[in-house]
Image: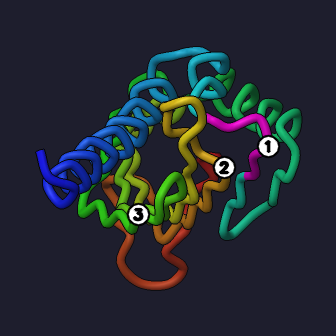
Amino acid sequence: MNQDVTAAVQEFLDRNKIADLIHRYCFALDHGSVEDVMALFAPECAVRLIPGQTFEKRDEVHDFYSKLIRHRMSLVRHTVHNLVIELKGDLASAKSYWDVKGDLRGQAVVLGGYYADQVNKRHGKWLFSEREIRIEFAAPAAEGWGGEPRIKIRAI
């Protein structure tokens, strides 16, 4: 194969692996353990919630996900879509919209927002180094998220 074809194939594979990383995150968060979630993060990692806190060290990120998983909804479906990936060698940025539907203490709820991620390839595996979780709406499903405020419940 010539260099252009080889580079194109590698780009395709990297994009596919980054998309898989983001999809695995959803399943791990919905149904897995904190170890499943943390296996998707680089040793040096950070998570920023907007609105909310920033967790700048791996142990802080672990504690955040541990609490989130301990208190997760009894039924939850977490999906991502409209994924945009910018590759720069072994570094990449990815943006995607996310939606969550779930049962929060007996109440049907909807949440949505977007992720802005920095990922890097280590030993052939793509991992999150930074994850920004922007929450744009969170509301009881019966009420809907229209109008202000758009964040009407606390689910995280």
- Residue drawn at x 70%, y 33% is 65
Taking depth in this image into account, of 90 and 102 the one nearest to the observer is 90
Most extreme residue toward the front, as rendered?
A: 2
Q: In the image, 43: left or right of 11?
A: right
Q: Residue at x 40, y 30 (%)?
A: 24
Amino acid found under the numbered disc labelled 2? Ser
Q: CA distance from mark 1 to mark 3?
A: 20 Å
Q: Quadrant of the N terminus?
A: top left
Residues at marks 1 and 3 touching, judged by CB atoms closer than 8 Å? no
Q: Which kind of residue does numbered mark 3 sit on?
A: Leu
Residue 43: say if magenta: yes
Q: Is label 3 in a helix, a strand or a loop?
A: strand
Q: CA distance from mark 2 to mark 3?
A: 14 Å
Q: Is residue 113 visible?
A: no
Tell me which numbered mark, 1 or 2, is placed earlier along the sequence. Answer: 1
Residue picked out by circle 3:
87
Residue denoted by label 2 = 129
Is 114 situated above or below 39?
below
Real-space Cα separation, disc 1 to disc 2, in angstroms: 6 Å
Classify residue 34 by image quadrant: top right
> Which of the 4 image quarters holds residue 18?
top left
Comparing labels 1 and 3, the label whose residue is closer to the camera = 3
Q: Please provide percent x and percent y for residue 85.
A: 35, 63
**Residue 98: x percent and y percent?**
37, 55
Determine which residue is flagged by label 1.
Answer: 44
> Residue sitting at 66 percent across and 27 percent down?
38
Q: Nearer the viewer, residue 19 or 54?
A: 19
- At label 1, which amino acid type do we have? Glu
Could you say which is closer to the camera, residue 76 or residue 45?
Answer: 45
Q: Is the residue 57 above or below the residue 33 in the image?
A: below
Q: Which residues are magenta?
A: 41-46
Q: Dots 1 and 2: beta carbons under 8 Å?
A: yes
